Amino acid sequence: MIIPKTDNTITIAPDLYLRMATPDDAQALFNIINSQRPYLREWLPFVDLTRQVSDTAFYLQTIVNSTSDRVFVIVSEEVVCGLIGFKGIEYFNRKVEIGYWLSEHQQGKGIMRQSCSRLLKYAFEILNMNRVQLKVAPKNYKSRNIPIKLGFTLEGTEREGELLNGHYHDLEVYSLLKKEWLAQAAK
């Protein structure tokens, strides 16, 4: 499904941008989830709970009204291909977590790394955050590579931090501080 650009966009490249997610994105996102269930459910606990487009619409409506979450659709070549956003924004402590997922067919193109890099800039410059963290499953190698390539520090393991497919799984916690990000940018 093709979604036009709006004023709520973060441009990454001429054919790649992030746009604030709205309930109007429910059908496009649900179509990806529904057509790629076996692939996505390996690492994403919400997939089995997303049974119809109304489930996705409900989630999107919830985040639109949230003050602690800010979620964007990832649009590549004018087609929605995933989600990325801030979870649990703590304005007082100036810290936030980034969460994301991407269509299987868009993997391996650098889309998620570029999207995360751009959200780091947004977090540190626009939201004035001091700390950004990512949590990834140790065996989700594609996802693990993103914080590593972006200069995050592995802080440790959140033991059995996620219930996925009926079993608890560990999560690696990676973080990047504003001063580290600024030092990288200065190089």
Image (cartoon, rainbow, N blue to C red):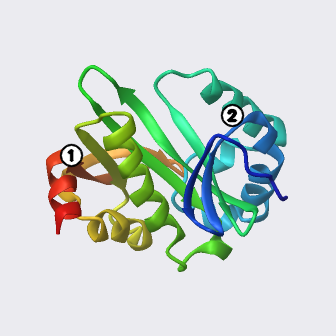
Q: Nearer the viewer, mark 1 or mark 2?
A: 1
Locate the C terminus by quadrant: bottom left
The answer to whether mark 1 and mark 2 are in CB contact below 8 A is no
- Name the residue beneath numbered marker 2: 60
Q: Position of residue 85 (x, y in %)?
A: 50, 44
Q: Residues within 10 Å of mark 1 (few under 14, many from 20)?
A: some
Q: Residue furthest bottom?
A: 108
Q: Which mark is residue 147?
A: none
- Name the residue beneath numbered marker 1: 178
The residue at the point 52 percent across, 35 percent down is: 70
**Type of amino acid at the residue the image marks with label 1:** Lys
Q: Is residue 94 left or right of residue 179?
A: right
The residue at the point 77 percent across, 44 percent down is: 25
Nearer-N-terminus badge (1/2): 2
Q: Foreground: 56 or 65? A: 65
Locate the N terminus by quadrant: bottom right
Q: Position of residue 150 (x, y in %)?
A: 30, 65
The residue tagged with tag 2: helix, strand or loop? helix
